[in-house]
Image: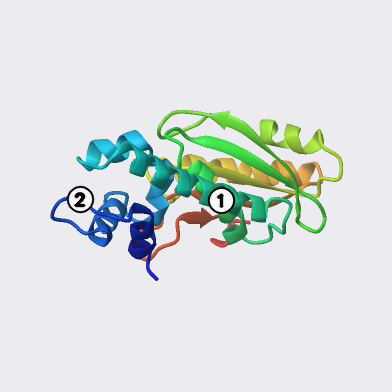
C-alpha cells in the first residue's frame, strides 16, 4: 500500500470533486513526499486545502506526530552505527524545524546512545557553533566513546556548505586530540528525486 493510500485511510473522505486518495496525493505533493509532512499542522492543512474540516486536519497531524514518536522510541538507546539509524532517530524531529539546530549524540563503546543534547539553534540557513561546545558535552559525560553531530538544513537540501566542511574537519581533529571518536556528522534534509534525505560525512569519506 502506497503513502497516498495510507493517508487516504486517515482522511476517509475527500473534498467535493476529489476522492480521498486524490486529496492524499495532493497533500503529499504539496510537501514533496513523506519527509515534508514533518512540519504539517492542522492550520496549514486547512489553509492550503479549503473545505478540510478542523477535526480531520487534527487527526492527520496527530497521526503523523504519533508515527514520529514511535520511530524515536524504537531507535532511542539502540545501535547508532550507520547514518540511516541516526536519521531514523533525529530526522523526523529536525525536519519539523524552521531554523538550523545542532545536536550531539553521545555513544558508548558499542555505539549505543547514552544521551543526546541540543547544542545550538540558529537562523533559517546557518547556526554558529564551535567544536569546543560539542566536545564539552562529550567530556562532561562518563562512558562516552564516540559522538555523532547532527544538524538540519531547513531548505531541505542536505548538501554540506563550505562552513559545514570546515567545522567537521576541526571537530574531527579536536575529538581525536581528547580521545573521543567523531563517528559521523549527519545533515538532515528532505528526500527528493530518489536521493536520501540526509548527508553523511562518514559515507562521503571525510571521516
Q: Quadrant of residue 132?
A: top right
Task: Check residue 174 in the rendering and tell me which mark sits there, or answer none.
Answer: none
Judging depth in this view, the residue of 23 and 141 nearest the camera is 23
Residue at 45% across, 32% down: 99
Callout 1 secondary element: strand
Whole-percent x and y of residue 123? Answer: 44, 28
Along the horizontal axis of the image, is 202 left or right of 158? Answer: right
Left or right: residue 24 versus residue 50 is right
Count residues near mark 2 (Cα–Cα under 10 Å), then give few for <14, some for 14-19, many for 20+.
some
How far apart are the two marked residues, 1 and 2, measured between alpha carbons?
40 Å
The percent position of residue 142, horizontal first and vertical second, equals 86, 40
Q: Residue furthest right?
A: 142
Residue at the image point whose x is 53% and y is 43% from the top: 93
In the displayed structure, 32 sits above or below 46; it is: below
Furthest residue in direction left, as rendered: 17
Please name which of the two marks, 1 or 2, marks the residue nearer to the observer.
2
Instruction: Confirm whether residue 89 shows in the render.
Output: no
Q: Position of residue 77 (x, y in %)?
A: 74, 52
- Quadrant (top left, top right, bottom left, bottom right) of the N terminus: bottom left
Residue 59 percent location from the top left of the image: 41, 44
Dot 1 corresponds to which residue? 186
Residue 94: tell me if it is visible.
yes
Q: Nearer the viewer, residue 12 or 49?
A: 12
Vertically, is 54 above or below 158?
above
Would you call the spot at circle 1 few (<14 residues within 10 Å), some (14-19), or many (20 or more)? many
> Which circle marks residue 15 in the picture?
2
Q: Sequence-wise, which precedes: disc 1 or disc 2?
A: 2
Amino acid at each position: 500500500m502506497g503513502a497516498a493510500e495510507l493517508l487516504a485511510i486517515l482522511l476517509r473522505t475527500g473534498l467535493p470533486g476529489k476522492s480521498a486518495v486524490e486529496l492524499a496525493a495532493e497533500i503529499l505533493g504539496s510537501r514533496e513526499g513523506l519527509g515534508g509532512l514533518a512540519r504539517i499542522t492542522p492550520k496549514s492543512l486547512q489553509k492550503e486545502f479549503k473545505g478540510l474540516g478542523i477535526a480531520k486536519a487534527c487527526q492527520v497531524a496527530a497521526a503523523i506526530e504519533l508515527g514520529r514518536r514511535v520511530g524515536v522510541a524504537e531507535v532511542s538507546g539502540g545501535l547508532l552505527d550507520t547514518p540511516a539509524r541516526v536519521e531514523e532517530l533525529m530526522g523526523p524531529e529536525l525536519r519539523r524545524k524552521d531554523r538550523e539546530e545542532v545536536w550531539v549524540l553521545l555513544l558508548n563503546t558499542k555505539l549505543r546512545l547514552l544521551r543526546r543534547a541540543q547544542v545550538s539553534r540558529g537562523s533559517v540557513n546557518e547556526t554558529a557553533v564551535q567544536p569546543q561546545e560539542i566536545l564539552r558535552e562529550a567530556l562532561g559525560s562518563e562512558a562516552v566513546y564516540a559522538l555523532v553531530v547532527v544538524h538540519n538544513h531547513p531548505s531541505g537540501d542536505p548538501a554540506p556548505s563550505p562552513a559545514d566542511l570546515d567545522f567537521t574537519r576541526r571537530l574531527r581533529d579536536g575529538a581525536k586530540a581528547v580521545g573521543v571518536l567523531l563517528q559521523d556528522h549527519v545533515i538532515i534534509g528532505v528526500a527528493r528525486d530518489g536521493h536520501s534525505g540526509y548527508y553523511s560525512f562518514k559515507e562521503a569519506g571525510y571521516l
